[in-house]
């Protein structure tokens, strides 16, 4: 559920980029931020370690403008993928309206993707959300790797549908805007009062 | 003119009064997801949107820490700096108030006012929910149509 401020006529949605460590979540967010025009975006905040691994989250606000009398905002977050940041990861999902799962197409990361995806489902359930109905997009990132895993292979392992899956090369911006577009549309379509 | 009674004030007015009364610099009311509900005082030198996101993160992290030591949560957080200090307190389960002030000697006053005005903010928040009139209702289908259009315009691969 987005946060609606009736007094100031504002609606805020929260979109979270989830996924295993090093899969390219921050790269996605940084690219989107770079592509948007200055008038609609706020500063990008990254809380990371010296090695640029996300420690708590990355964040930037995006102002969609005035829609039907309401000022609409998307608050964009990434979570830290590293295993031992489980507590912070769960916190960031609180109040989320949609989640982009950024998977790593490297074959050696297959298990890690699966584990992380299941953790995300557990995190969602901890907020009484049904992961199978929750707006989510699965992005296979790092399609530039020569031995990339097949599209669809994670879904069959997880036993989920494949209708909101995309490939991407976040370092080159490929598939990044398509992903956020698909995510945003799902979030808006699920919106109800 | 009669001064407006606290009960009739908008949330912004309550917050503005709090700032004045406590002699703080500014105050924010934010949700635990990190969205600004209301702000008052001198916020010109601050990015309040970013601040709300960070403080919400900070608060939720502290809440987890509280649980680890067997507390439900710490209801007040205080950050003491050299020139400026921040007082963060829970207003309801899902909202908190952030007060930035400069003279550390007024901490007692800030704390007192945070509690007093907190009560009015609670009342204001529930009134805001109750008083949602028909005209405030978001026209959902129109909203969706416009929003979907806008999304196509904003997230194009070769913008800028
Ligand atoms: N080959 C390749 N490398 C990528 C791609 N996207 C990201 N990377 C690289 O993967 C590494 C990790 O990227 P990040 O965006 O920091 O990963 P993250 O998911 O935010 O990682 P955590 O914050 O630790 O969870 C960086 O060195 C990126 O340059 C891609 O599409 N292809
Ligand atoms: Mg990161």
Image (cartoon, grey):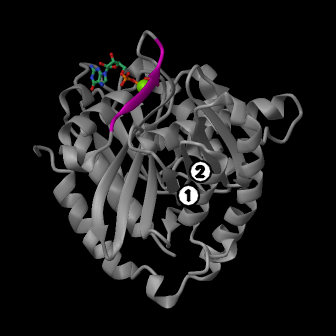
| Residue under the point 51% across and 43% down | B52
Vertical arrangement, residue A40 with respect to residue A167, above or below: below
- In the picture provided, is B17 more to the left or to the right than B74? left
Q: Which residue is mark 2?
A: B19
In the picture, the disc for residue A156 is none
Asked whether, in this view, residue A73 is left or right of residue B96, the answer is left
Residue B42 image point, x, y percent: 45, 46
Residues packed near mark 2 inside 10 Å, few (<14), some (14 to 19) or many (20 plus):
many
Q: Nearer the viewer, residue B5 or B60?
A: B5
- B143 or A102: nearer the viewer: B143
Residue A121 is situated, as x and y percent measured from the top left of the image, at 59, 45
Q: Quadrant of residue B138?
A: bottom left
Give the magenta range. Answer: A43-49
Quarter containing the C terminus of chain B: top left
Residue beneath the point at 56% across and 48% down? B27
Asked if residue A136 can be seen in this view, the reply is yes
Proximity of marks 1 and 2: CB atoms separated by less than 8 Å: yes
Question: Of B50 and A111, which appears nearest the observer?
Answer: B50
Q: Quadrant of ligand 2?
A: top left
Residue A21 vertical placement versus B13 (above, below): above
Residue B82 sits above or below residue A12 on the image = above
Q: Chain of mark 1?
A: B
**What subunit carries mark 2?**
B
Q: Let me know if marks 1 and 2 both belong to one chain.
A: yes
Circle 1 residues within 10 Å: few <14, some 14–19, many ≥20: many
Q: Is the N terminus of chain B in the top left, top right, bottom left or bottom right quadrant?
A: bottom right
Answer with the quarter of the image where residue B122 lies. bottom right
Residue B16 disc label: 1
């Amino acid at each position: 559920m987005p946060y609606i401020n009736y007094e100031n006529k504002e609606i805020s949605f929260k979109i979270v980029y989830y996924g295993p460590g090093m899969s390219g979540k921050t790269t996605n967010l940084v690219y989107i931020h770079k592509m948007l025009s200055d008038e609609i975006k706020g500063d990008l905040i990254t809380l990371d370690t010296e090695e640029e691994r996300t420690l708590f989250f990355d964040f930037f606000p995006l102002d969609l403008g005035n829609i039907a009398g309401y000022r609409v905002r998307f608050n964009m977050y990434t979570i830290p993928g590293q295993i031992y940041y489980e507590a912070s990861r769960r916190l960031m999902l609180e109040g989320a309206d949609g989640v982009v799962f950024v998977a790593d197409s490297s074959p050696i990361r297959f298990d890690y993707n699966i584990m992380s995806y299941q953790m995300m489902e557990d995190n969602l359930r901890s907020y009484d959300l049904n992961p199978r109905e929750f707006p989510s997009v699965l992005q296979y990132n790092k399609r530039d790797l020569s031995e990339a895993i097949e599209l669809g292979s994670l879904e069959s392992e997880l036993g989920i549908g494949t209708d909101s899956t995309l490939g991407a090369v976040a370092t080159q911006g490929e598939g990044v805007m398509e992903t956020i577009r698909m995510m945003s549309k799902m979030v808006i379509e699920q919106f109800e009062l | 003119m009669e001064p407006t009674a606290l009960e009739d004030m908008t949330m912004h007015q309550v917050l503005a009064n709090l700032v004045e009364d406590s002699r703080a610099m500014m105050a924010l009311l934010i949700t635990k997801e990190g969205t600004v509900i209301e702000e008052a005082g001198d916020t010109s030198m601050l990015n309040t949107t970013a601040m709300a996101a960070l403080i919400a993160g900070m608060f939720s992290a502290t809440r987890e820490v509280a649980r680890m030591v067997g507390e439900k949560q710490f209801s007040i957080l205080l950050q003491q700096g050299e020139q400026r200090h921040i007082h963060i307190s829970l207003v309801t389960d899902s909202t908190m108030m952030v007060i930035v002030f400069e003279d550390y000697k007024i901490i007692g006053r800030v704390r007192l006012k945070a509690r007093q005005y907190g009560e009015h903010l609670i009342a204001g928040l529930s009134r805001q929910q109750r008083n949602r009139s028909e005209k405030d209702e978001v026209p959902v289908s129109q909203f969706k149509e416009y929003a979907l259009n806008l999304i196509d315009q904003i997230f194009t691969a070769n913008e800028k």
